[in-house]
Amino acid sequence: MYALVCLGFCGHAVMNRAGDRAETHYFRSDRLFSVNDKWYFSTREHLDQGPYTTRNEAEIEMIAYAKIFKKHQQKAS
């Protein structure tokens, strides 16, 4: 299970894995990146998704991807 935490000071979303201890602080690198004015996100499986016109669009799609991945994992278990 994942919990989506939005950090207001930077505007980035961080996915916390089930089992992460609340008192432990994890640093996860930003999965969004830009190449030639197009935006992409990188998955945990090291697949680059995109291109997207804006960073916001890439971030929305990244969150949607995570939700689909989560549902797929739940069906598999």
Image: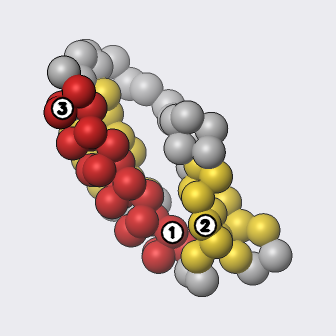
Position of residue 32 in the picture relative to residue 24 (left or right): right
Please tell me how crowded label 3 is: few (under 14), some (14-19), or many (20+) other residues with Cα within 10 Å.
few
- Label 3 or label 1, whichever lies nearer to me, is 3
Task: Tell me which corner region of the image, top left, top right, bottom left or bottom right, holds residue 26.
Answer: top left
Please tell me how crowded label 2 is: few (under 14), some (14-19), or many (20+) other residues with Cα within 10 Å.
some
Query: Looking at numbered disc 2 in the image, what kind of residue is underneath it?
Result: Gly
Task: Tell me which corner region of the image, top left, top right, bottom left or bottom right, holds residue 8.
Answer: bottom left
Residue that numbered label 2 is attached to? 50
Instruction: First in sequence, mark 1 or 2: give its number.
Output: 2
- Spatial CA distance of label 2 from label 3 is 25 Å
- Expressed as whole percent of the image width and height from the top left, the position of residue 29 reads 58, 40
| Camera sees residue 51 | yes
Instruction: First in sequence, mark 3 or 1: give its number.
Output: 1
Tell whether label 2 touches label 1 (CB within 8 Å): yes
Residue that numbered label 3 is attached to? 74
Residue that numbered label 1 is attached to? 58
Residue lying at the far right of the rendered structure = 36
Tell whether label 1 touches label 3 (CB within 8 Å): no
Instruction: Pick whichever, 10 or 37, lies toward us.
Output: 37
Position of residue 1 in the picture relative to residue 40 (left or right): left
Query: Looking at numbered disc 1 in the image, what kind of residue is underneath it?
Result: Ala
Residue at point 43%, 58% (across, down): 62
Task: Tell me which corner region of the image, top left, top right, bottom left or bottom right, holds residue 63.
Answer: bottom left
Residue at point 35%, 48% (across, down): 66
Per the rendering, the mark at residue 37 is none
Query: Looking at numbered disc 3 in the image, what kind of residue is underneath it?
Result: Gln
- Spatial CA distance of label 3 from label 1 is 24 Å
SS for tag 2? strand
Please tell me how crowded label 1 is: few (under 14), some (14-19), or many (20+) other residues with Cα within 10 Å.
many
- Label 1 or label 2, whichever lies nearer to me, is 2
- Spatial CA distance of label 1 from label 2 is 7 Å
